[in-house]
Amino acid sequence: MRTFFGLVPLSALAVAITLVIAIVLSSRLAAWLQTRRSVAALVVLGFGLVISATVMPTAAALDGISSDGVCDTSRVGFASMAELTSVNESSLNVLLFVPLGIAVGLLPWSRAAAATAAAAFSLTFIVEAIQLLLPVLGRGCQTADLVDNLMGLAIGFAVGLLARPLASRT
């Protein structure tokens, strides 16, 4: 596992930076989104966790090994139920986008919320494009990831919509 100055794993560093950014931006973002600071922080965390998990270079890339720069299009549909109910790349890709979907679902309807939802939807396409266009990251573009990420976003959004009445009471 690669580390920052030999002490902190890069993934932990990325998450820590995401937490700091969420704390710093949550107040202003909450005002723009017309929501509570905790929901705004969840929006930032959702975006940050996705970016941290999908755009950071792999260990192989840090050793100078790039990806092939080709997008794997072997799966364009949903993963099987067996894949989704076990721990693997598909289920983890679904889970990665659930917090962002929940955050978007918790937002009150507004233009800012619509822009945030559009950004969340676009994020999976942007991530795959970055992985395709920057093989130096050692990441691989996969159409399966698009489907899995959008499924996670949709599941999270539904949970957020269902939780919105409960969340607005507190």
Image (spheres, helix red, strand yellow):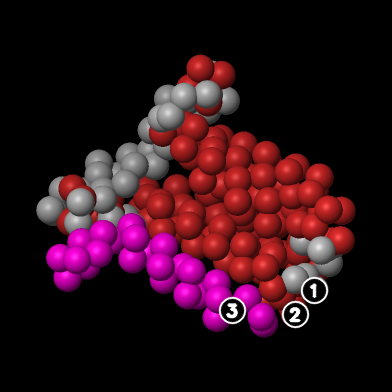
Q: Which residue is mark 2?
A: 31
> Which quadrant would the C terminus be assigned to in this image?
bottom right
> In terms of depth relative to the viewer, which is nearer, 140 or 163?
163
Q: Are marks 2 and 1 in contact (CB under 8 Å)?
A: yes
- Residue at figure coordinates x 60%, y 51% from the top left: 99
Image mark for residue 153 = none
Magenta residue span: 3-28
Q: Earlier in the sequence, mark 3 or mark 1?
A: 3
Closest to the observer, 160 or 115: 160
Q: Which residue lies most toward the front here?
A: 170
| Secondary structure found at label 3 | helix
- The reply to whether residue 98 is visible in this rendering is yes
The image position of residue 61, as x and y in percent, is 20, 52
Question: Would you identify the image quadrant in which residue 130 lies?
Answer: bottom left
Q: Position of residue 159 (x, y in %)?
A: 73, 43
Q: Is residue 15 magenta?
A: yes
Q: Rounded to the nearest whole Å, what is the CA distance between mark 3 and mark 1? A: 14 Å
At numbered mark 1, what does the secondary structure look like: helix, strand or loop?
A: loop
Q: Compared with residue 159, is residue 117 higher up or lower down, i.e. above or below?
A: below
The three-letter code of the residue at mark 3 reads Leu
In 3D space, how far apart are the residues under numbered discs 2 and 3 (Cα atoms)? Answer: 10 Å
Residue 25: give its label. 3
Amino acid of disc 2:
Ala
Name the spot of residue 11 as percent of width and height, x first.
33, 58
| Number of residues whose C-alpha sits closer than 10 Å to that of mark 1, classed few (under 14), some (14–19) or many (20 or more) | some
- When the figure is inspected, residue 103 is found, relative to residue 65, above or below; the finding is below
**Pointer 1 residue:** 34
Report helix, strand or loop for mark 2: helix
Picture residue at 49% right of the left edge, 32% below the top: 91
In the image, is residue 78 above or below residue 1? Answer: above
Residue density around tag 2, few if under 14, some if 14–19, many if 20 or more, within 10 Å: few
Looking at the image, residue 168 lies above or below residue 34: above
